[in-house]
Image (cartoon, rainbow, N blue to C red):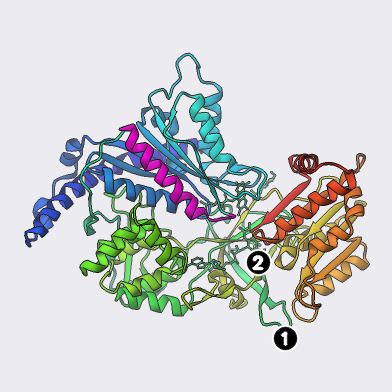
Amino acid sequence: MSSIVGYLHGLFQGPSVFGTALLGLCVLLSLLMNELTKKKKTAPAKDSVVKPMEAAEADDRDQCTLVFGTQTGTAEKFAKTLKSQLESAYASTTAFHLVDAENYDAKNVLHKEKLVIFLVATYGEGEPTDNALDLHDYLMEAAKNCDVASPPLAGVTFAVFALGNRQYEHFCAMGKKVQKCMVEMGASPLLPMGNGDDDDDIDRDFDDWSSAFFNALQESKLLQAGARVDMTKDCVPAYHIQKVMDAPKSEVNILTNGSGTNVHKPYLARVSLVKELHSASSDRSCVHVEVDISGCKAHYETGDHIGVYPENSEDVVKRAAELLEKSLDTCFTLSRDNRFEELVDFPVQGPITLEFALKHFADLLSSPSKAALKMLSAFASDEGERTRLTMMSSLEGAKQYDQYIHIPKRSLLEVLADFPSAKPSIGAFFGSISPRLQPRYYSISSSPKMHPHSVHITCAVVCEEMPTGRVHHGVASTWLSKLQIGDSIPIFLRNSSFKLPKDSNAPIIMVGPGTGFAPFRGFIQERQSSKASLGDAFLYFGCRDRKKDFIYKEEINGALENRVITKLEVAFSREGKKKDYVQHHIDKDGKEVWSLLKSKSNPGYLYVCGDGKHMAKDVNRVLHSIVQREEKCSSSAAESIVHKMAEEGRYLKDVW
Ligand SMILES: Cc1cc2nc3c(=O)[nH]c(=O)nc-3n(C[C@H](O)[C@H](O)[C@H](O)COP(=O)(O)OP(=O)(O)OC[C@H]3O[C@@H](n4cnc5c(N)ncnc54)[C@H](O)[C@@H]3O)c2cc1C
Ligand SMILES: Cc1cc2nc3c(=O)[nH]c(=O)nc-3n(C[C@H](O)[C@H](O)[C@H](O)COP(=O)(O)O)c2cc1C
Ligand SMILES: *[C@@H]1O[C@H](CO)[C@@H](O)[C@H](O)[C@H]1NC(C)=O
Ligand SMILES: *[C@@H]1O[C@H](CO)[C@@H](O)[C@H](O)[C@H]1NC(C)=O
């Protein structure tokens, strides 16, 4: 792995010089342009082109690096926003570099940094994201071995914004580790670490931290502020687009068939079954999808996740092309423009049509980030539109952004429609405005013991009205529900720590209402296939109405009859006058549940899966009150008992 990183760094060093040069150029250019437009004259950009090497030598600005560790794109989004806001204030004196943690050569460059900013998310049981694994290992190792007498990072100033979710035992653990290691190696924190809580409002947490960050930066006088710089088209990181006129049909729009072992190498799996799980009387939908992985190099274990790359619907794709004023059959290849170091290789080489690119790779329905609005502003020919976009992307415009974008949940498409004079080029749209469409994760609802060659998915179809009146059809769930047998879809497999106890005699308590049942279907299949003796297994399931959405009812009842599960409690939330939820049943069974969990000789395991916004919290609360009741102890004593269970890996959550 480290050799790959070294190699990537080598690649990265080259373009970075040009990138830096380009930015310097852009800054000068846009300052110049500002002057010229004031005098109602325009200077042709051509005249100002300087050979990259000359510019690089001329660029003696300070350097600042922003490193992001992300799984689903939030940390990257924040890093881009911070970078664009930093550039507004400091670009004339400082060059900012956005670096994927995977490509950051900490060993060779960290000690040379003047100011380095880490934006890192936490996963699993307090682990780093996949792309930050090497960074994590390096920092831990280097901090452990560092010479306290001459700390290696003495001249380095740093800042950390940690992304996490307070529902997890190890809240923001990766951020905390980075912070600690940096301090141990003698680096100075610019300000206290920021904690972003995805359970609450992580965007607001980031805004608050950003304000504090800019204040601290100003006070530190570390960087020199220059004139404010507006965005110009030439500075927007864009792919180089080469139109293709005559490619044979068989060579256009090809997805690569990878190993399926990680997010970068999706495997094209054949869909072998799609089935509605709700009854006809339900007004919602939940689908069971099976995909064939017999040719796939990756294997899975019960409790693992599958990642799926979805497609945008035809309507959404058409609307996007309309707004961009480009034809859907425009056929092109995209390549990285070396002037922009932060652009990563496009996922496919092409040639591809605009339709294919929009369908597979553009996130069109999420809200645009502040950085995206700033990039879009460069393309607005209308002065008023440009001013408004620039305002909303600025640090001072946080309230306007909140009110126009964040609260009404405006999608990128809605924003494009509201700013009709802003028509980005295809290269800029994919490079800077629309984020990459992210894979969605599903808790695998089968066990390889029973289904070694297929992976089952249990997916609730998202459909909800947004504040603007737009009905949002969940991108992946809607698409999954419409798949046909024989379609091939890009998937990959991912390890999780949501695993059955090693000892099959250990009692287990499974709490999984709705699609939260998914991994437990796998657990049940694994137990069914096992020849070993089995301990107690309680299942707490929940749905609205037994006639509508009691998914896998026959299988669950069958498992109870065969004693693969030893107790079944189902909460029907909408049958009676009073809401009945899983936590009410757990509470009622408190004595029995706690006697299984607390046993000294054969301690039990508690598993909670599904909705994290409400259900998992309610279950957690009930667990605390049961412990307090049964142990006759204080609330803080109950707290530490539950904490200990989690530490021992006997209280596991798979929530979303
Ligand atoms: C580890 C893990 C396991 C999971 N397991 C399962 C599983 O087993 N079964 C299952 O059904 N799901 C599971 N999920 C959830 C799943 O990954 C998807 O999130 C879910 O299917 C919805 O995806 P979607 O593309 O259909 O919806 P999306 O289009 O991504 O929309 C999802 C939500 O985002 C919000 N949203 C959309 N647009 C905007 C906007 N412009 N501004 C603000 N908010 C917006 C809406 O509230 C909407 O409900 C799991 C998630 C994780 C992380
Ligand atoms: C499967 C899963 C596991 C997670 N584990 C943790 C955790 O242990 N601690 C934590 O603070 N946050 C945890 N989170 C929350 C993420 O860190 C948070 O949602 C973050 O905003 C994701 O950032 P990203 O989009 O850049 O990957 C977890 C989220 C998921 C989906
Ligand atoms: C992907 O490759 C595997 C193994 O080489 C093969 O079995 C599978 O059919 C391929 N998928 C598609 C859609 O071509
Ligand atoms: C998941 O982890 C287990 C044990 O740590 C390992 O044996 C297995 O190969 C991993 N699977 C994948 C897909 O990485």
Q: Residues within 10 Å of mark 2 (few under 14, many from 20)?
A: many
**Identity of the residue furthest to the bottom in this view:** 281
User: What secondary structure is the magenta-colored segment mainly?
Assistant: helix
Whether residue 300 appears in this view of the structure is no
Q: Is residue 220 magenta?
A: yes
The residue singled out by tag 1 in the image is 281
Residue 115 x %, y %: 37, 34
Secondary structure beneath disc 2?
A: strand
Q: Is residue 483 visible?
A: yes
Q: Residue furthest top?
A: 149
Q: Position of residue 504 (x, y in %)?
A: 87, 49
Region rendered in magenta = 199-221
Left or right of 523 on screen, residue 318: left
Looking at the image, is mark 1 or mark 2 earlier in the sequence?
1
The number of numbered discs placed on residues in the rendered structure image is 2
Q: Amino acid at mark 2?
A: Asp
Is there a contact, CB below 8 Å, between mark 1 and mark 2?
Answer: no
Task: Give the labeled residue for mark 2.
Answer: 292
